[in-house]
Amino acid sequence: MCGLAGIIKLDTSDKSDYSNLMNKFCDVLKHRGPDSKGIWMDQYIGLCHTRLSILDLSKSGAQPMISESERYIIAFNGEIYNHLEIRNQIEKNHQSFSWKGMSDTETILKSIEVFGFEASLKKFTGMFSIAIWDRQKKEVYLARDRLGEKPLYFGFSNNEFIFTSELKTLDYYPSFKKEISMDAAKRYFKFGYVPSPLSIYKNIYKLTPGTFIKANLNQIRDRELKPKEYWSIESAARDGLNNQIDNIQEIETTFQHLLKESVNSQMISDVPIGCFLSGGIDSSLITSVMQECSSGPVKTFTIGFEEPEFDESKDAAMIANHLGTEHTELIVTSNDSMDVIPNLPNMYDEPFSDSSAIPTYLVSKLAKSKVTVSLSGDGGDELFGGYNRYLYTHRFWNKISFLPFHIRKSISAIVGLLPINLLSNLLKFSSKDNFQSLIEKIYKTGKRLDSVRNIDDLYLSLVSDPYIDNSFFKNYENNSDNFYDHFPSTNDLKGLGFSVGYDRMMFLDQLTYLPDDILCKVDRAAMSNSLETRAPFLDKNLVEFSWKIPSKFKIHNNKTKFILRNTLNNYIPNHLIEKPKSGFGIPLGDWLRGPLNQWANDLLSSQKIKNQDIIDFDHISYYWDQHQKRDFDWGSKIWTILMFQAWLEEKF
């Protein structure tokens, strides 16, 4: 795993020397690649790379790397798991090639020379962000892996084109003027993350998963950059849905074969490798297959919490004991968790409100103490129907769909008139243990009834904040902008042949939530500890096969991940895995009333909010006061605001 950054001059008369800046970028990205750094420059481009050595630890794997013909220069972040197969293809037809080492970076370069850039991307199985300079044609190539495991940002500053693994390099770029994109901020407050292709800064964008850019100097100068797809979730879904398999035995046999193949390929490493083990279905299955493929005990890692409702360490320990892994467990205190919080704005570079970033960072830190690479169960929920919201959406829609929309809106209006503090006081007498969660369900249900016209709208209301609208922002034009306009519309999805809402929800999660929240969270948390993570479920062949599995074999008898559970039963007794699903979370609500209270009060001070002139203070005061009085648990919403405020304070 590595870090990369580059600058292309668009003014050929510019004689600036970028060597000092490239060295600074290397320093900034050192956490992504602490083992070595490299810089390559000519009159057009400055390119830098920091290396975390995984395959071929020798100098022959160093980057930026120059192709044998000296035409191409590459800076590459990631792993190509099938690079030895691609080498064999090259050698069969081009025996004159000689290899300098065993790195996948060298394989990429030679593949491009033999097969071309786009054809090579289609061959690669792995996770990657790639930057290549063609010295002959004065062209740049940028590419990102199919699911978005590795980050790549690009954009403009004056007469320069810039690209980077992480936005923090821009903090040290003198000519870049940081301006907040209100379109991005608006979506952040709605979803808790900034969705691709936006970034939090104007004129800087995320390269969307499964796409590449090929542009010469004139195209860059004219800003004619049109990312082109070489693979897409939509094409995988379309092909899979048109070729579904209705035989459970055939599905299970093929799935087990593909999963084992994926895990085997991702265990290739010249450094110590292990696996995250939370005790849940996804990580337990990956660990089980990994142990089956391993000649010795697999190193597994889990963290536990002092708070019983958030602690799964005992479940993980029992599974590790059953599988015979070399298990490492760490029970973290609330202080351990809270010590991470000041680092989050610089870790993610954008506002990012998924609080499970904290335990993800801590388990990555634990794993790094013994290994350099760790496999994970990421992707299992999105591919195989793991989220409880999939079940809830169908149940709720079946209960309300018979009501005309105008009646649902009227019910919503009535619910909205109920004072929260009055309802809270009434419920305290009748349901002392669960009154806050009940209030929250009533109010959120009311909001959904106001805007839900179909099952897709219902899904979107579950993955976003129903309370955010234009009035939340200061000096933002009050228009009819659709917060969901980066999602495909319902009409766009009809052509895919979705028969039930489960498929639609999984499609949208794979398109947005998976790359922009889950994979972003894991990449930054792990790389902050110089740890490479790999996700076997996100293997291209497994993703494409998942769409051939009918949803009835993913969600069955009100149970999620049916196919994964069946497979896991081959390795682990049922009683060790059949338990309620719990997230990788922290007790936000209580912390904000207790040990984080002063920190939060400072970030939410009226003077600070009003001086920033971005968010309406009255909204914040309303939520904060109700949370402190325990009228309503607004912990998640307040955390979203706090992460924006903390980021703003760190970066401006």
Image (spheres, rainbow, N blue to C red):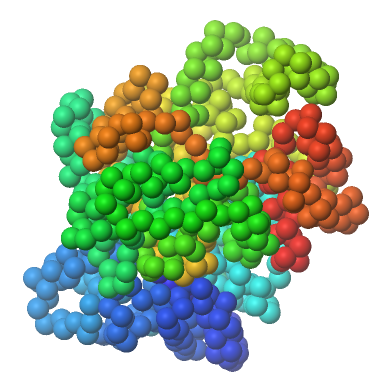
Q: Residue furthest right?
A: 607
Find residue 496 and report its image quarter: top left
**Relative side of 548 to 561, left or right:** left
Residue plotted at (60% across, 22% down):
452
Q: Residue 207: in sight, yes or no? A: no
Q: Residue 418: in sight, yes or no? A: yes
Q: Position of residue 462 (x, y in %)?
A: 57, 31
Give whichever of 152, 293 is nearer the camera: 293
Say which quadrant the N terminus sits in: bottom left
Residue plotted at (25% across, 65% down):
268
Position of residue 552 relative to residue 68, above or below, is above
Give whichever of 473, 376 is nearer the camera: 376
Q: Position of residue 46 (x, y in %)?
A: 50, 83
Position of residue 547 relative to residue 227, above or below, is above
Say which quadrant the C terminus sits in: bottom right
Residue plotted at (69% across, 17% down):
431
Residue plotted at (41% across, 41% down):
315
Number of numbered discs on residues: 0
Position of residue 62 relative to residue 195, above or below, is below
Give whichever of 428, 314 is nearer the camera: 314
Q: Position of residue 354 (x, y in %)?
A: 59, 48
Q: Position of residue 434 (x, y in %)?
A: 66, 23
**Relative side of 130 to 151, left or right:** left
Position of residue 296 relative to residue 70, above or below, is above
